[in-house]
Amino acid sequence: MLENKKIAFIGPGAMAEGMIAGLIRNHLAQPSTLSVAGPRGERGDELVQRYGIKYYANNHDAAHEADLVVLSVKPQRLERVLKGLQNSIRPNALVLSIVAGAPIQKITTGLLHSRVVRCMPNTPAMIGEGITVWTSAPDVDAEQLEMARTFLTALGEEVYVEEESYLDMATALSGTGPAYVFLFMEAMVDAGVHLGFPRRIAEQLVAQTVRGSVDYYRKRLDPVHLARLRNEVTSPGGTTAAALYFLEKAGFRTAISRAVWAAYERSQELGKGGKSHSPEQTSASNDY
Ligand SMILES: NC(=O)c1ccc[n+]([C@@H]2O[C@H](COP(=O)([O-])OP(=O)(O)OC[C@H]3O[C@@H](n4cnc5c(N)ncnc54)[C@H](OP(=O)(O)O)[C@@H]3O)[C@@H](O)[C@H]2O)c1
């Protein structure tokens, strides 16, 4: 429980709602201690009715009384929001940012406030099944680190890293990761339909195969390399071997490696100010 800490969400969008739902579902916070601020009254009313929390039309009103201020606006809005929040945050309050690609230094200088935690969650956080990689500025004290850790458990697993450079890597791997998984699943479902399955059945087969495979990997008592699990389903001259041959021939691993690297480079670029780009401008795509 976050011990009656007041938590304000600046930016009442999808991620903020996922966090609010997780905090309440896991009895980590009382609705009366939570507030959101954003420009659209209808969205505020929706969250008030759904969760019994407070809504403010003005960011300052939510932030100035909070112990924990969560920045959950889109990256394009961040600069203006930081400027508007200068002098709104109590000196001992903790600011926790989930804004993709926004370095800690941008937030500390934008807010004139040094107690900042930067996080990279992912969308399964909406149902408490996410994974968040996070780090902190030097002025965040031990109690605030524990507060941040407890807060993040509402979203699923959390991994603290000492160096901020890991945040761009996490953005490319776990932050963007659900998109790779969904694309892979979509391709499998389409292949199932191509074979002749009704789409509904293809979707069920694929979703449970992915879920079951993940559980089979993670719930084993003996940690095992993924390649061993793959070998278990690959009999000599069999169906899996025939399929894997084509995946390797198509450069499946390289495509994934290059895609993750491209996301990493883009995350670094956005952190430096986000210049415009063409689809194949990253060095990760140079050898295509
Ligand atoms: N979605 C993900 O997978 C994911 C993963 C990791 C990190 N993130 C980060 O999480 C952040 C939020 O993402 P999201 O998907 O929740 O976005 P979202 O649904 O668009 O939420 C952003 C919210 O901010 C509000 N807003 C706009 N201008 C504002 C202002 N000046 N002051 C206060 N609130 C304002 C928006 O209101 P209106 O709708 O009225 O404009 C909206 O409710 C982003 O920075 C993103 O990088 C997202």
Image (spheres, rainbow, N blue to C red):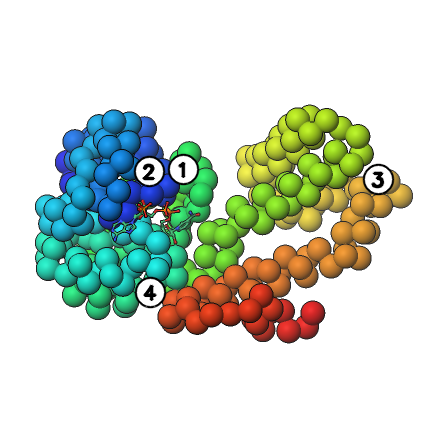
Secondary element type, mark 1: helix
Residue at the spot 14% in from the left edge and 61% down from the top edge: 86
- Tell me which numbered mark, 2 or 4, is placed earlier along the sequence: 2
Q: Nearer the viewer, mark 4 or mark 3?
A: 4
- Tell me which numbered mark, 4 or 1, is placed earlier along the sequence: 4
Mark 2 lies on residue = 17
Q: Are marks 2 and 1 in contact (CB under 8 Å)?
A: yes
User: Would you say 187 lies left or right of 240 here?
Assistant: left
Percent coordinates x, y for residue 21 in the rendering: 32, 33
- Mark 2 → mark 4, Cα distance in angstroms: 23 Å
Mark 3 lies on residue = 239
- Mark 2 → mark 3, Cα distance in angstroms: 44 Å
User: Which quadrant is the N terminus positioned in?
Assistant: top left
Secondary element type, mark 2: helix
- Tell me which numbered mark, 3 or 1, is placed earlier along the sequence: 1
Q: Are marks 2 and 3 in contact (CB under 8 Å)?
A: no
Q: Are marks 4 and 1 in contact (CB under 8 Å)?
A: no
Secondary element type, mark 3: helix
Mark 4 lies on residue = 103
Mark 1 lies on residue = 126
Percent coordinates x, y for residue 125 in the rendering: 41, 40
Q: Amino acid at mark 3?
A: Thr
